[in-house]
Image (cartoon, helix red, strand yellow):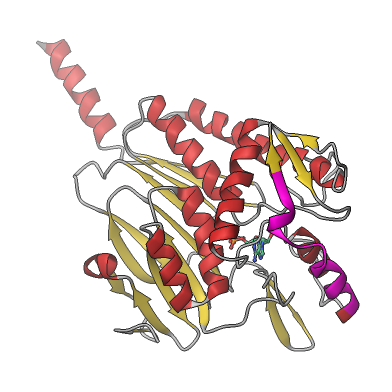
Amino acid sequence: MKQSAFLFAIVLASCSQGPVHYTDFAIGTTVNLTLYDQDRPDLWKEILVDLKWLDDTMTIWEREEPSTLMRANSAAGDPLGYPIGPELAEVIRLGLEISRESQGALDISVGPLVKAWGVATENPRVPNKEEVSRALALVGWDRVRLESGRLYLDRPGMMLDLGAVAKGWMADRIVEKLRARGVERAIVDLGGNIALLGSKPDGSPWKVGIQDPFQTRGRYLGILETGPTSLVTSGIYERFFEQDGIRYHHILDPKGGFPVINELAGVTIVHPNSGLADALSTAVFVLGGKAGWELAQRYRAEIILINRDHTVWVSPALRDGFQLVAGEYSLQENLP
Ligand code: ADP
Ligand code: MG
Protein backbone atom coordinates (compact mmCIF):
# COMPACT_ATOMS: atom_id res chain seq x y z
CA MET A 1 0.00 0.00 0.00
CA LYS A 2 2.69 2.35 1.05
CA GLN A 3 4.74 1.47 -1.98
CA SER A 4 1.98 2.13 -4.51
CA ALA A 5 1.33 5.54 -2.97
CA PHE A 6 5.01 6.25 -3.40
CA LEU A 7 4.89 5.19 -7.06
CA PHE A 8 1.84 7.35 -7.60
CA ALA A 9 3.70 10.31 -6.18
CA ILE A 10 6.58 9.79 -8.60
CA VAL A 11 4.27 9.60 -11.60
CA LEU A 12 2.59 12.81 -10.51
CA ALA A 13 5.91 14.55 -10.07
CA SER A 14 7.13 13.58 -13.54
CA CYS A 15 3.86 14.76 -15.11
CA SER A 16 3.97 18.13 -13.45
CA GLN A 17 7.54 18.73 -14.60
CA GLY A 18 6.28 20.30 -17.78
CA PRO A 19 8.17 20.49 -21.05
CA VAL A 20 11.95 20.05 -21.27
CA HIS A 21 13.93 22.60 -23.28
CA TYR A 22 17.28 22.14 -24.94
CA THR A 23 19.15 24.89 -26.69
CA ASP A 24 22.50 25.35 -28.40
CA PHE A 25 24.25 27.17 -31.21
CA ALA A 26 24.56 25.15 -34.42
CA ILE A 27 24.37 25.59 -38.20
CA GLY A 28 25.10 29.28 -37.69
CA THR A 29 22.03 29.92 -35.56
CA THR A 30 20.30 29.15 -32.28
CA VAL A 31 18.55 25.81 -32.25
CA ASN A 32 15.95 24.69 -29.72
CA LEU A 33 14.13 21.51 -28.94
CA THR A 34 11.14 21.26 -26.62
CA LEU A 35 9.93 17.84 -25.56
CA TYR A 36 6.59 17.42 -23.82
CA ASP A 37 6.38 13.74 -23.04
CA GLN A 38 9.88 12.77 -22.02
CA ASP A 39 13.32 14.00 -21.09
CA ARG A 40 15.75 12.71 -23.71
CA PRO A 41 19.21 14.26 -23.47
CA ASP A 42 20.46 11.34 -25.60
CA LEU A 43 18.20 12.43 -28.47
CA TRP A 44 19.31 16.04 -28.17
CA LYS A 45 22.93 14.90 -28.41
CA GLU A 46 22.11 12.94 -31.55
CA ILE A 47 20.38 15.94 -33.07
CA LEU A 48 23.44 18.11 -32.47
CA VAL A 49 25.53 15.47 -34.26
CA ASP A 50 23.04 15.54 -37.16
CA LEU A 51 23.29 19.34 -37.34
CA LYS A 52 27.06 19.14 -37.44
CA TRP A 53 26.70 16.64 -40.27
CA LEU A 54 24.39 19.09 -42.07
CA ASP A 55 27.08 21.76 -41.88
CA ASP A 56 29.78 19.34 -43.00
CA THR A 57 27.67 18.38 -45.97
CA MET A 58 25.77 21.44 -47.14
CA THR A 59 27.21 24.73 -45.94
CA ILE A 60 29.11 27.08 -48.24
CA TRP A 61 30.22 29.35 -45.42
CA GLU A 62 33.96 29.70 -44.96
CA ARG A 63 35.37 26.98 -42.73
CA GLU A 64 38.55 24.97 -42.22
CA GLU A 65 37.46 21.81 -44.00
CA PRO A 66 35.33 22.36 -47.10
CA SER A 67 31.86 20.77 -46.96
CA THR A 68 30.78 18.19 -49.52
CA LEU A 69 28.81 20.90 -51.32
CA MET A 70 31.86 23.18 -51.40
CA ARG A 71 33.88 20.37 -52.99
CA ALA A 72 31.13 19.72 -55.50
CA ASN A 73 31.02 23.45 -56.29
CA SER A 74 34.79 23.42 -56.87
CA ALA A 75 34.21 20.80 -59.55
CA ALA A 76 31.90 23.16 -61.49
CA GLY A 77 32.58 22.90 -65.20
CA ASP A 78 33.96 19.39 -64.91
CA PRO A 79 32.11 17.24 -67.49
CA LEU A 80 32.45 14.27 -65.13
CA GLY A 81 30.50 16.04 -62.42
CA TYR A 82 30.95 15.28 -58.73
CA PRO A 83 29.58 12.34 -56.68
CA ILE A 84 27.16 13.31 -53.91
CA GLY A 85 25.17 11.34 -51.34
CA PRO A 86 21.42 10.76 -51.44
CA GLU A 87 20.62 13.39 -48.77
CA LEU A 88 22.46 16.18 -50.53
CA ALA A 89 20.84 15.06 -53.78
CA GLU A 90 17.42 15.22 -52.13
CA VAL A 91 17.90 18.80 -50.95
CA ILE A 92 19.23 19.86 -54.34
CA ARG A 93 16.28 18.19 -56.07
CA LEU A 94 13.82 20.06 -53.85
CA GLY A 95 15.71 23.31 -54.42
CA LEU A 96 15.72 22.80 -58.17
CA GLU A 97 12.01 22.05 -58.23
CA ILE A 98 11.10 25.27 -56.44
CA SER A 99 13.68 27.19 -58.48
CA ARG A 100 11.87 26.01 -61.60
CA GLU A 101 8.35 26.51 -60.24
CA SER A 102 9.17 30.01 -59.03
CA GLN A 103 10.81 30.78 -62.37
CA GLY A 104 14.08 31.48 -60.71
CA ALA A 105 12.84 33.69 -57.86
CA LEU A 106 14.39 31.04 -55.68
CA ASP A 107 17.58 29.98 -57.41
CA ILE A 108 19.84 27.57 -55.56
CA SER A 109 22.68 28.43 -57.95
CA VAL A 110 22.77 31.93 -56.43
CA GLY A 111 26.13 31.12 -54.74
CA PRO A 112 28.36 33.46 -56.79
CA LEU A 113 26.05 36.36 -55.96
CA VAL A 114 25.94 35.45 -52.27
CA LYS A 115 29.75 35.43 -52.27
CA ALA A 116 29.95 38.78 -54.08
CA TRP A 117 27.80 40.33 -51.34
CA GLY A 118 29.67 38.54 -48.58
CA VAL A 119 26.41 37.31 -47.06
CA ALA A 120 27.09 35.60 -43.73
CA THR A 121 30.72 36.75 -43.67
CA GLU A 122 32.26 39.22 -41.25
CA ASN A 123 32.56 41.76 -44.05
CA PRO A 124 29.40 41.96 -46.11
CA ARG A 125 29.64 44.73 -48.71
CA VAL A 126 27.96 46.18 -51.77
CA PRO A 127 29.73 44.75 -54.83
CA ASN A 128 30.40 47.01 -57.82
CA LYS A 129 28.57 46.67 -61.13
CA GLU A 130 31.21 44.45 -62.74
CA GLU A 131 31.24 42.10 -59.79
CA VAL A 132 27.47 41.84 -59.90
CA SER A 133 27.31 41.11 -63.62
CA ARG A 134 30.16 38.62 -63.38
CA ALA A 135 28.29 36.81 -60.62
CA LEU A 136 24.97 36.99 -62.46
CA ALA A 137 26.52 35.32 -65.49
CA LEU A 138 27.22 32.30 -63.27
CA VAL A 139 23.72 32.04 -61.81
CA GLY A 140 21.17 29.77 -63.47
CA TRP A 141 19.35 26.80 -61.92
CA ASP A 142 18.65 25.45 -65.42
CA ARG A 143 22.35 24.78 -65.87
CA VAL A 144 22.45 22.44 -62.90
CA ARG A 145 22.02 18.71 -63.45
CA LEU A 146 21.65 15.83 -61.07
CA GLU A 147 22.13 12.38 -62.56
CA SER A 148 22.95 8.96 -61.10
CA GLY A 149 24.25 10.42 -57.86
CA ARG A 150 26.44 13.02 -59.55
CA LEU A 151 26.10 16.77 -59.59
CA TYR A 152 26.92 18.63 -62.79
CA LEU A 153 27.39 22.38 -62.80
CA ASP A 154 27.66 23.66 -66.32
CA ARG A 155 30.39 26.27 -65.98
CA PRO A 156 33.45 26.82 -63.82
CA GLY A 157 32.64 29.29 -61.07
CA MET A 158 29.04 28.19 -60.66
CA MET A 159 28.11 27.55 -57.05
CA LEU A 160 25.07 26.09 -55.33
CA ASP A 161 23.88 27.65 -52.07
CA LEU A 162 21.34 25.61 -50.12
CA GLY A 163 20.93 28.22 -47.39
CA ALA A 164 17.32 28.79 -48.37
CA VAL A 165 16.30 25.13 -48.23
CA ALA A 166 18.54 22.95 -46.05
CA LYS A 167 17.32 24.04 -42.60
CA GLY A 168 13.73 23.14 -43.37
CA TRP A 169 14.73 19.81 -44.86
CA MET A 170 16.72 19.08 -41.70
CA ALA A 171 13.77 20.02 -39.48
CA ASP A 172 11.75 17.30 -41.26
CA ARG A 173 14.52 14.77 -40.65
CA ILE A 174 14.61 15.66 -36.96
CA VAL A 175 10.84 15.30 -36.62
CA GLU A 176 11.07 11.88 -38.30
CA LYS A 177 13.79 10.83 -35.91
CA LEU A 178 11.85 12.00 -32.85
CA ARG A 179 8.77 10.16 -34.01
CA ALA A 180 10.74 6.98 -34.66
CA ARG A 181 12.14 7.19 -31.11
CA GLY A 182 8.72 7.36 -29.56
CA VAL A 183 8.44 11.11 -29.04
CA GLU A 184 4.87 12.24 -29.59
CA ARG A 185 4.89 15.95 -28.77
CA ALA A 186 7.71 18.30 -29.60
CA ILE A 187 8.75 21.65 -31.02
CA VAL A 188 11.83 21.72 -33.23
CA ASP A 189 13.14 25.24 -33.77
CA LEU A 190 16.13 25.67 -36.07
CA GLY A 191 16.71 29.40 -35.95
CA GLY A 192 13.06 30.29 -36.41
CA ASN A 193 12.36 27.40 -38.75
CA ILE A 194 9.72 25.64 -36.66
CA ALA A 195 8.35 22.12 -36.93
CA LEU A 196 5.67 20.86 -34.59
CA LEU A 197 5.12 17.23 -33.68
CA GLY A 198 1.81 16.02 -32.29
CA SER A 199 -0.29 18.28 -30.10
CA LYS A 200 0.09 19.82 -26.68
CA PRO A 201 -0.54 17.47 -23.74
CA ASP A 202 -3.90 19.08 -22.97
CA GLY A 203 -4.96 18.75 -26.61
CA SER A 204 -5.11 22.51 -27.17
CA PRO A 205 -3.59 23.91 -30.38
CA TRP A 206 0.02 25.09 -30.56
CA LYS A 207 0.47 28.83 -30.31
CA VAL A 208 3.35 30.03 -32.45
CA GLY A 209 4.69 33.58 -32.46
CA ILE A 210 5.02 35.14 -35.91
CA GLN A 211 8.27 37.09 -36.24
CA ASP A 212 8.06 40.86 -36.54
CA PRO A 213 10.38 41.48 -39.51
CA PHE A 214 11.29 44.95 -38.26
CA GLN A 215 12.52 43.62 -34.94
CA THR A 216 15.23 41.21 -33.88
CA ARG A 217 14.47 37.52 -33.74
CA GLY A 218 11.96 36.47 -31.13
CA ARG A 219 9.83 39.66 -31.27
CA TYR A 220 6.38 38.70 -32.46
CA LEU A 221 3.74 40.65 -34.32
CA GLY A 222 1.12 37.95 -34.07
CA ILE A 223 0.23 34.55 -32.74
CA LEU A 224 -0.96 31.65 -34.84
CA GLU A 225 -2.89 28.78 -33.35
CA THR A 226 -2.26 25.64 -35.30
CA GLY A 227 -2.14 21.86 -35.36
CA PRO A 228 1.06 19.94 -36.05
CA THR A 229 2.72 21.53 -39.07
CA SER A 230 5.77 23.60 -39.87
CA LEU A 231 6.23 27.38 -40.01
CA VAL A 232 9.10 29.00 -41.85
CA THR A 233 9.81 32.70 -42.12
CA SER A 234 11.96 34.70 -44.51
CA GLY A 235 12.44 38.37 -43.94
CA ILE A 236 14.55 41.47 -43.83
CA TYR A 237 15.38 41.03 -40.15
CA GLU A 238 17.53 37.92 -40.30
CA ARG A 239 20.88 39.07 -41.65
CA PHE A 240 21.63 42.52 -42.88
CA PHE A 241 24.30 45.20 -42.94
CA GLU A 242 24.42 48.92 -43.50
CA GLN A 243 26.59 50.78 -45.96
CA ASP A 244 26.34 54.54 -46.58
CA GLY A 245 23.17 54.65 -44.51
CA ILE A 246 21.40 52.03 -46.61
CA ARG A 247 20.35 48.74 -45.13
CA TYR A 248 20.95 45.61 -47.23
CA HIS A 249 19.46 42.26 -46.27
CA HIS A 250 20.42 38.72 -47.30
CA ILE A 251 17.75 37.59 -49.77
CA LEU A 252 18.95 38.39 -53.25
CA ASP A 253 17.09 38.83 -56.49
CA PRO A 254 18.81 36.26 -58.75
CA LYS A 255 17.90 38.32 -61.81
CA GLY A 256 18.90 41.83 -60.72
CA GLY A 257 21.71 40.82 -58.39
CA PHE A 258 20.63 43.04 -55.49
CA PRO A 259 18.73 42.38 -52.27
CA VAL A 260 15.05 42.07 -53.05
CA ILE A 261 13.06 45.25 -52.64
CA ASN A 262 9.32 44.89 -52.96
CA GLU A 263 6.33 45.55 -50.73
CA LEU A 264 7.22 42.68 -48.40
CA ALA A 265 9.14 42.80 -45.15
CA GLY A 266 8.52 39.18 -44.27
CA VAL A 267 6.77 35.99 -45.26
CA THR A 268 5.72 33.04 -43.15
CA ILE A 269 4.85 29.78 -44.89
CA VAL A 270 2.80 27.13 -43.12
CA HIS A 271 3.07 23.62 -44.54
CA PRO A 272 3.60 20.19 -42.97
CA ASN A 273 6.71 19.70 -45.11
CA SER A 274 9.28 22.02 -43.57
CA GLY A 275 11.76 21.69 -46.45
CA LEU A 276 9.10 22.77 -48.88
CA ALA A 277 8.02 25.59 -46.56
CA ASP A 278 11.62 26.82 -46.33
CA ALA A 279 12.09 26.84 -50.11
CA LEU A 280 8.73 28.52 -50.59
CA SER A 281 9.39 31.19 -47.96
CA THR A 282 12.41 32.46 -49.84
CA ALA A 283 10.70 32.13 -53.23
CA VAL A 284 7.58 33.99 -52.08
CA PHE A 285 9.68 36.71 -50.51
CA VAL A 286 11.40 37.29 -53.86
CA LEU A 287 8.20 37.03 -55.92
CA GLY A 288 6.18 39.48 -53.83
CA GLY A 289 2.75 38.89 -52.32
CA LYS A 290 0.56 38.32 -55.32
CA ALA A 291 2.74 35.97 -57.38
CA GLY A 292 3.95 34.45 -54.12
CA TRP A 293 0.46 33.48 -53.02
CA GLU A 294 -0.19 31.92 -56.42
CA LEU A 295 2.92 29.78 -56.03
CA ALA A 296 2.02 28.85 -52.44
CA GLN A 297 -1.44 27.71 -53.51
CA ARG A 298 0.02 25.30 -56.04
CA TYR A 299 1.64 23.53 -53.09
CA ARG A 300 -1.33 23.91 -50.73
CA ALA A 301 0.80 26.06 -48.50
CA GLU A 302 -0.78 28.69 -46.27
CA ILE A 303 0.92 32.02 -45.87
CA ILE A 304 1.21 35.19 -43.83
CA LEU A 305 2.51 38.22 -45.71
CA ILE A 306 3.91 41.13 -43.74
CA ASN A 307 4.16 44.26 -45.80
CA ARG A 308 6.61 47.10 -45.30
CA ASP A 309 3.66 49.40 -44.63
CA HIS A 310 2.80 47.30 -41.55
CA THR A 311 -0.24 45.68 -43.07
CA VAL A 312 -0.55 41.92 -42.74
CA TRP A 313 -2.32 39.55 -45.10
CA VAL A 314 -3.24 36.10 -43.84
CA SER A 315 -4.38 33.35 -46.21
CA PRO A 316 -8.01 32.33 -45.62
CA ALA A 317 -7.43 28.96 -43.92
CA LEU A 318 -5.25 30.58 -41.23
CA ARG A 319 -7.47 33.54 -40.40
CA ASP A 320 -9.45 31.99 -37.55
CA GLY A 321 -6.26 31.00 -35.76
CA PHE A 322 -4.34 34.24 -36.25
CA GLN A 323 -4.24 37.15 -33.87
CA LEU A 324 -2.20 40.37 -34.09
CA VAL A 325 -0.36 41.32 -30.92
CA ALA A 326 1.69 44.34 -32.06
CA GLY A 327 -0.23 47.60 -32.14
CA GLU A 328 1.47 49.12 -35.16
CA TYR A 329 0.17 46.39 -37.46
CA SER A 330 -3.23 46.01 -39.06
CA LEU A 331 -4.85 43.23 -41.04
CA GLN A 332 -5.48 43.69 -44.71
CA GLU A 333 -8.53 42.05 -46.32
CA ASN A 334 -7.36 41.70 -49.91
CA LEU A 335 -4.08 41.18 -51.65
CA PRO A 336 -3.11 44.33 -53.54
P1 ADP B 1 17.17 32.25 -43.50
O1 ADP B 1 18.56 32.72 -43.69
O2 ADP B 1 16.44 33.01 -42.48
O3 ADP B 1 17.01 30.78 -43.38
P2 ADP B 1 16.06 31.96 -46.15
O4 ADP B 1 15.52 30.61 -45.98
O5 ADP B 1 15.17 32.90 -46.87
O6 ADP B 1 16.39 32.68 -44.80
O7 ADP B 1 17.44 31.79 -46.90
C1 ADP B 1 18.26 32.87 -47.21
C2 ADP B 1 19.62 32.35 -47.64
O8 ADP B 1 19.50 31.73 -48.92
C3 ADP B 1 20.65 33.46 -47.83
O9 ADP B 1 21.43 33.61 -46.68
C4 ADP B 1 21.47 32.99 -49.01
O10 ADP B 1 22.46 32.11 -48.58
C5 ADP B 1 20.47 32.21 -49.83
N1 ADP B 1 19.74 33.03 -50.81
C6 ADP B 1 19.59 34.38 -50.88
N2 ADP B 1 18.80 34.74 -51.91
C7 ADP B 1 18.43 33.58 -52.51
C8 ADP B 1 17.62 33.26 -53.65
N3 ADP B 1 17.00 34.21 -54.36
N4 ADP B 1 17.48 31.96 -53.97
C9 ADP B 1 18.09 30.98 -53.27
N5 ADP B 1 18.85 31.22 -52.20
C10 ADP B 1 19.02 32.48 -51.82
MG1 MG C 1 13.88 29.65 -47.04
Please state which of residues 220 and 142 is positioned toward the viewer in this rendering.
Answer: 142
State the image coordinates of residue 187 (x, y, percent, origin top left): 40, 45
> Can you give x and y, in whole percent of width and height, for residue 167 in the image?
57, 49
Picture quadrant where residue 24 is located: top right
Q: Which residues are magenta?
A: 130-145
Q: Residue at coordinates 50% horizontally, 44% vertically from top-left?
A: 171
**Viewer-closest of 159 and 314:** 159
Q: Position of residue 6 (x, y in %)?
A: 19, 18
Q: On the rendered image, what quadrant is the N terminus found in?
A: top left
Q: Report whether residue 75 is seen.
A: yes
Side (left or right) of 162 relative to 113: left
Residue found farthest to the left: 1
* Residue 151 % position (x, y): 74, 40
Image height check: is 331 above or below 165? below
User: Magenta includes 154?
Assistant: no
Magenta segment: does it hold 138?
A: yes
Number of on-image labels = 0
> Which quadrant of the structure image shows residue 46?
top right
> Would residue 224 appear left or right of 81 to someone viewing this image?
left
Front residue of 79 and 241? 79
Q: Residue at 72% x, 34% y: name it.
A: 84
The quadrant the C terminus occupies is bottom left
Q: Residue at x 87, y 55 (%)?
A: 157
190 left or right of 82 in image: left
Residue 23 visible in the displayed image: no
The secondary structure making up most of the magenta span is helix
- In the rendered image, the vertical position of residue 151 relative to residue 115, given as above or below: above
Q: Is residue 52 depicted above or below 154 in this figure? A: above
